[in-house]
Amino acid sequence: MRVVVTAGFDGSRSALIVAETARARGHEVLVLVATPFRVARVKSLIRQGGWHALKDAAGRLMRPTARSGSADLDALLPSGTSVLPESLAAWALALGVEHHSVGSLNEPGVVELVRAWGADLLLYNGGGILRAPLLSALNGPVLNAHAGPLPEIRGMNAVEWSVLLGEPTTVTIHQIDEGIDTGRVWKQIPVPIEPGDTIERLRARAVRCGVAGLLEALRARESGELAFESARPARGRQCFVLAPALRELLARRLESHA
Amino acid sequence: MQVVTNHAHSDTRLPSRRLEATDCYAGRARELGAWIKTSLRPDGGSSAYYMPGYGWVDAYPETTGYLIPTLLELDRRFPGEGYGAYAERAGEWLLAIQSGEGWWPAGRWPQRETKPSLFNSGQILTGMVSLFDETREQKWIDAAARASTWMASRVDDTGAWPGGDYSATRMPSYYAHAAAPMLRVWEKTKDQPVHDAAVAVLETIAGRRQPNGAFADAGFREGSAAPTHTVAYTLWGFLDAADAVRASCWRDVARPGIDVLVRRAELSGGSLPGSYDEAWKKGTSTVCLTGNVQLALCFLEVDRHEPDLRLVNAAAKLVDFVCDARVPGLSAAVPGSWPLWGPYMRFRFPNWSAKYACDAIFALMDRLESELTFS
């Protein structure tokens, strides 16, 4: 199979693990990294979360890799995998894998690249909202690991909103379509809340479940068992980044799980 | 202004200890209250706005009227600081300038030539009803009854007030915010003609709602983008009417527009563009701060009936933006626009911006605290 793996930044550990697993399983891999430093993306980040959000995002990028719980993520790799480099670019260079750093995954040049390459599957690990031209450039599904139950919790900060709205914390593996988290669902994976969990720990656990889910979907696609549920209509309002007061409420709610 | 208390979340409420966020909000409200006090004149009226280099201008009957419930709420939250007395003095001043027919005048006070104002009279009803609820003194509801009877008498056969305060022929949609207080008076007096007149106006305005949720003619000038201040007036009129007559159908009129604005508030991170046309195209990139907090109140009012923390999230972002929009040297005040040179009340600090900021902060605090239990 020809598998595209996307990422929102070059140090994405989860994207690296998905890409390496796909490669190790004998698939051809194309890596597309949407640079985080576009003006539009920075503006959007500031609008959503203020200057603090920009500072936080920059902090995450400046760390050697965005590795919260990377040991947990690395445990998902096939046994015998050598130590992986810090970045997708370094990994791709070492292994001769095609890697592109782009301004936007929706650029016409990227769409044409994906179409010409003959992609059978896209495993999404970040890089912004995908538009119709890219979605239709593939010969197969575009899959995402959404950190919340669908169709109940759509949008951003999904694992956080699941806790706040009293929904079961869940990762949903689903197709990406033109809506916001409206694509057909393949699988829902429970994400347990553990005593002492902070927002960060819970998010990290959801990321791990998401990566595991995408890898399971890859294997299902290999064996022709990737079957999706019928589309269900979107429910409820879209979720967005938590305001500080709601974030504090969430932290208090997690404390009460102790 | 309704205090938000009606939330049954017994399954998810959290143990004790106030949120730091609500303490911050309370501090900001206290600053706003102190600022509002500086607007109050010896005769009881509240000045319309503050201008740097000039100070507070003349009193404004309209906004003095709807400031009263905020003063009463400040008195409840910060007892012993005299806000209750200020509220009654404001009420007495309004009684003194009410016309024999029952209307209150347009514009600021004093004025060389008084002109009746439908819209302004409607805003003052809110203050009169609040004082009646607080004190049970008949004079307040009598004044409100006289005004609302006069307002009812001006509604024509089409269910409209034919001339507004800024136009001889046109009733803007934000006059929903004048009709709804009439229903609050009706709640007390059961004066059916007042009720029927208010409902007729609301039905006329409801008929102007577009499929996309926007209301035609919601701005100050026909054909121009409506500031979020008057968009919120329009929406709140229906929400308030729904509560007054216990009819959710009025809330349903406002809901589509509110859903659009919730999303816009989130996508903008709280820096909501300050005006929109009927296609929801923004008319400015500057923020109408008054509109921000008024819309936060609208979101929280919908949440009060259909609890959804996503509405609270959007409201919090609008409130936080206003709380953070501070001018050095005048940091307690809320300007009309942000940046200051925005078109809404350019370089001025309206008394009503502070009023609505207070109201929104209190509603938000109550809502957040409803998620907690206190031992």
Image: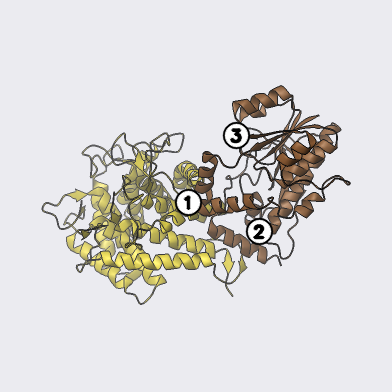
Position of the N terminus of chain B, as image quadrant, is bottom left
Q: Are marks 1 and 3 on the same chain?
A: no
Residue wearing tag 2: A199
| Chain that is brown in the image | A
Quote the CA–CA distance across marks 1 and 3. Answer: 34 Å
> What type is the residue that disc 1 sits on?
Phe
A245 in relation to B166, above or below: below
Tell me the crowding category of disc 2: few under 14, some 14 to 19, or many 20 or more residues within 10 angstroms, Cα based: some
Q: Colour of chain B?
A: yellow
Q: Which residue is disc 3 drawn over?
A: A104
Q: Nearer the viewer, residue A197 or A90?
A: A90
Q: Chain of mark 1?
A: B
The reply to whether callout 1 and callout 3 are in contact (CB within 8 Å) is no
Q: Is residue A172 visible?
A: no
Are circles 2 and 3 on residues that touch, CB within 8 Å? Answer: no
Answer left or right for A127 relative to A53.
right
Q: Quadrant of residue A6?
A: top right
Type of amino acid at the residue the image marks with label 2: Ile
Decide if residue A253 is on the left or right side of residue A69: left
Q: Is residue A223 left or right of residue A37?
A: right
Q: Position of residue A132 (x, y in %)?
A: 62, 28
Along the line of sight, the residue nearer the viewer: B256 or A145: A145
Identified at 65% across, 53% down, the residue is: A63
* Mark drawn on residue B127: none
Q: Chain of mark 3?
A: A
